[in-house]
Amino acid sequence: MSQTTETAESPPTDADASGADGAAATATEAETTVTVRCTGHVRTELDVYEFEYTFAGDTLRAFLDELFEEYPQLQDMLIAETEEDATHSGWAPAPDELPGTWTKNPVGEQTTTYARILVNGHFNENENGFDTKLEEGDRVALVYPFMFCC
């Protein structure tokens, strides 16, 4: 179940309207509501800066699955299908061994060049990737800045 509303408005939710039926559904399927903030191309595509989004589950993966089902154009914009889509040709090559605990998300879970998905201000790659747990009220930022060159 997904619900999108702009932060400025607070219309009644499906759970408010369905009463006991909504309580029974919630008991069997956990729902999480997060604040979604959009920048750059994502903001232009959705024509909104910030909104609340309710989805079934409690991971970034569950959130993205529902969001991309509702807004399929965002998946093409944010998610790289290949390693080449995720890496800019001008970036310095990565060393054979990365220092510390740096890791990349697996192919298919990487963002396109310059695009990023953050949870509470942290890159998802620095947390648990798409398996990062989301809690009620967390902030998810969908960042794809405008790039201008001379």
Image (spheres, grey):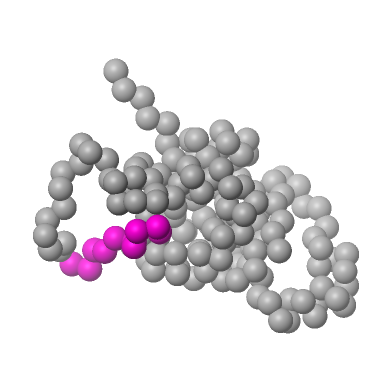
Q: Residue at x 60, y 71 (%)?
A: 57
- On screen, residue 8 versus residue 37, left or right, reads right
Residue 52, image x and y in percent?
Answer: 65, 54
Reply above or below: 28 against 55.
below
How many numbered badges does the structure rendering display? 0
Q: Is residue 101 magenta?
A: yes
Residue 21 image offset from top left, x and y in percent: 86, 76
Relative vertical location of residue 109 with respect to residue 141 in this rendering, above or below:
below
Residue most extreme to the front:
82
Furthest-left residue in this view? 96
Quadrant of res 99 = bottom left
Viewer can see residue 111? no
x, y (%) of residue 84? 29, 46
Q: Is residue 2 visible?
A: yes
In the picture shown, does residue 20 fall above or below 43?
below
What type of secondary structure mainly makes up the magenta span?
loop
Q: Quadrant of residue 48?
A: top right
Q: Which residue is drawn at the image coordinates 20% and 37% (left, top)?
A: 90
Please give the name of the residue rendered at 81% of the width and 67% of the height, measured from the top-left corner.
Answer: 15
3 left or right, relative to 23: left
Q: Quadrant of the C terminus?
A: top left
Numbered range of the magenta stretch: 100-109
Q: Is residue 79 left or right of residue 58?
A: left
Residue drawn at x 33%, y 48% as measured from the top left: 86
- The quarter in which the N terminus is drawn is bottom right
Residue 36 on the magenta span: no
Instruction: Give x and y (percent) for residue 64.
Output: 54, 58
